[in-house]
Image (cartoon, rainbow, N blue to C red):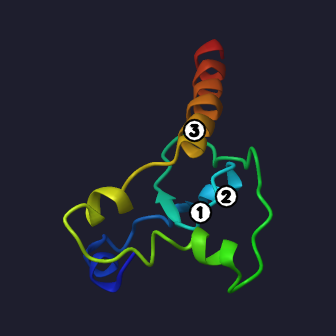
Amino acid sequence: MNDLARDAMPDDLLAPHIMQPFWFGEPAYKATGWYLRGLPPLRATDLLREPERHSDGWWLWNRIHRMPPGPDRARLRSRSFPGMMQAAAAQWGESAMQQMAA
């Protein structure tokens, strides 16, 4: 989160749960923060080994941050990663089912 956005947040807001796509089998760096209310933190499901810094693979994983300006930049940078969404659906769905059964 950039400084301007952080300054606009309420002072009593809890810290977001930060995760990376490569924890869920997606070869990319893009820290994603979610404010979890009544949900457990996501557990990594398919942790990828990070490429060596400044290698070709590392530059590829950083493609989102290096994306040039353009008409589709905001849309492409805000997209969700399927591996993260599948983990959220499975883990939080299971949590909801357990809460309903209790």
Say few, some or many: other residues with alpha carbon within 10 Å of mark 3 (under 14 / 14 to 19 / 20 or more): some
Residue at the extreme left = 71
- The structure residue drawn at horizontal position 67% and vertical position 49%, both measured from the top left corner, is 24
- Residue type marked 2: Phe
Q: Which mark is residue 88?
A: 3
Q: Earlier in the sequence, mark 3 or mark 2?
A: 2
Residue indicated by mark 1: 28
Q: Earlier in the sequence, mark 1 or mark 2?
A: 2
Residue indicated by mark 2: 22
Residue 75, quarter of picture: bottom left
Depth order, front residue of 94/15: 94
Is 53 rendered above or below residue 26?
A: below
Q: Are marks 1 and 2 in contact (CB under 8 Å)?
A: yes
- Residue type marked 1: Ala
Say few, some or many: other residues with alpha carbon within 10 Å of mark 1 (under 14 / 14 to 19 / 20 or more): many
| Residue 35: % across, % down | 46, 54
